[in-house]
Image: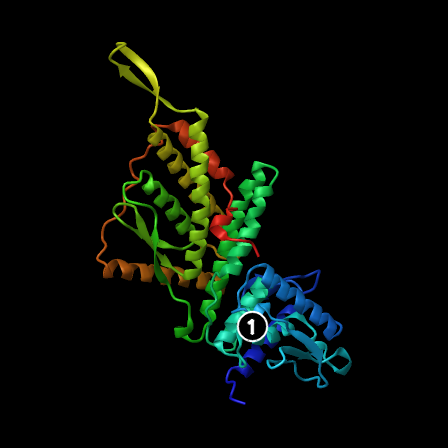
Amino acid sequence: MTRDPDQRAVYAAEDRLTAWLDSTTPERPTVTVDGQTYEPGPDLRFTEPGSAATYLDAVLARLRADGKDYDGREQQVVTVRPRAGARMATYEPATQTIALPPYAVGGRWALRATVVLHELTHHLSGEQHHTPAWRATFLRLLEDAGLPVTAQLLQLAYAAEGLEQVVHTVDDGTLARLAKLLRQAERASNEHERAAFLSKAQSFATRHSVALAVARAHTAKEEGREQPVAENYRIGERGKRGLARYVRLLLNIAHANDIRCTISHDSTALTMHGFPSDIAVTKAMYESLLVQMVADCERHLRSGARDERTVWDASRRRYVARPVATITARLAFYEAYAWRIGERLDEARQAALAEAGVDTDGPTSTETALAVRQKELDVHDFFAEALRRNNIRGTWAADRRTKVNDAPRAAEEGLRAADRARLGEDKALGEAG
C-alpha cells in the first residue's frame, strides 16, 4: 500500500460534514456555517446494505440518463455487499464492489448516502487515495446526484481542514440545474410566472457565486484557489447591424455576475474578465436571452405595428406620415430590451446578496460579505492589470446614439418582451439534470 497523505484530513472534513447534516431536522432544516445559512436536505439513511445498493443503482441510473460522463465508469455495474467488520466501508476495484458493515454489527454510521457516494467516488474517479482529483470527483458527484448544497458544505469542510482547494466551478451539472429550474417557464400558465423565472435564475447564479467566494476565502493554500481568467467571446461578423446592442445585452448580464469586459472597436468581439464560474453563467444567460430578443423583435416587426415619422413629400407638396426604417425599429427594440434585462438581473442580484447577509451599501463585516468583497477586488485588480498590460485607455461608446426616441413603440415592445423573458432555451443550456 502506498501512502495516502490526505486521508486523515478528508475523513476529518467528512466528520464535520456529518455533524452539520445531523444538526438539521425537518422542523429546522438549515445549518449555519461561518455566518452563512445552508439548507442541504437530509442525508438518506439505510437499514441494511441491500437498501444502500438500491440507492446506488438509482444514482448510477441518474448519471447515465443525464448524460454525465465519468470516463465511461458510470456505465459499469457496481455492487454492494455486507462486510464483517464495523469500522470501515471500502471499495474493491477488482470486483467493483462496495463493502458496507450491516446495522447488526455496528454499521449504522456507514448506512447513509454520503458514505455510499464516498465509496462510489473511488470507482468513478479511478483513484485509490483521497487525492485532489478524487475530491473534485466527489464534489461533482454530489452535485450530479442532486445534492449541491451538501457539495458546498463539503468544500467548506475541506478548506477548514487545510486541504488544497480543488477545481470546483460551475460545471455541466450546475448549468443543467439552472436550465431545469428556468425551463419550467416554458410551461408557465401566465406571463407573471414566466417573468419570475429570470429573477430566480439570477438569484440562483448569485447564491452559487457567493458560496464559491466563501469557499475561496477559506482556502489555506493560495496557489490552489480559483483565479480570475480572461476569455474571448465572439459577438458576430463585421458589418452586421445591431452588434452594439448585442454587446450591451451581454454587458448588462456580465455586470450582474461580477464580470468586467473589454470590447473590440467594431463590436464584433469582447473579452470577459472574471472567475470561470461567473463567465459560464454569463454566457449561458446571454445565449438564451439573445435568441429570445431576436425572435421577439421579429414578431413585433411582422405585426405591422410600426412607429411613424412625419416627412416632407415633395411630389405631394405636404408632410406625410411614413413608417420608420426597419433597422431603426429593430435597434430601438434591442436597446430597450437590453436595458430592462440589466435592470431585472441587478434587482435579483441585490436581493440574493441581501438574503446572504451582504449589504452592498453598508459596512463590510460578516465573513460572507468580506469574501464577496474580496472577490470583487480580485476581479478589479485582474481587470486593471489587463487594461495596463494591453495599454487600453479609451471607453466603448458604440451604442451611445440612441434609437429609442426615433421608435418609441418598438422600444416599448422591447421592454415588454424583456419582462416576459425566461431562460429556457435548451440550445443555450443543454439538457437538464
Residue positioned most to the bottom: 1
Instruction: Name above or below for residue 402 compared with residue 109.
Output: above
Colour scheme employed for the rendering of this structure: rainbow
Frontmost residue, 341 versus 318: 318
Residue bearing mark 1: 124
Q: Position of residue 169 (x, y in %)?
A: 47, 63
Q: Position of residue 69 (x, y in %)?
A: 53, 65
Residue positioned most to the top: 317
Frontmost residue, 255 versus 241: 241
Q: Quadrant of residue 103?
A: bottom right
Quadrant (top left/top right/bottom left/bottom right) for the N terminus: bottom right
In the rendered image, is residue 265 in sight? Answer: yes
Q: Please, what secondary structure does the residue beneath circle 1 have?
A: helix
- Taking 263 as reference, is 40 left or right? right
Q: What residue appears at the point 38 percent right and 66 percent down from the top-left corner?
A: 227
Q: What residue appears at the point 51 percent right and 88 percent down from the top-left corner?
A: 3
Frontmost residue, 220 versus 116: 116
Figure disc tally = 1
Q: Quadrant of residue 321?
A: top left
Q: Position of residue 225 (x, y in %)?
A: 42, 70
Q: What residue appears at the point 46 percent right and 41 percent down from the top-left corner?
A: 292
Residue positioned most to the right: 104
Q: Amino acid at mark 1?
A: Leu
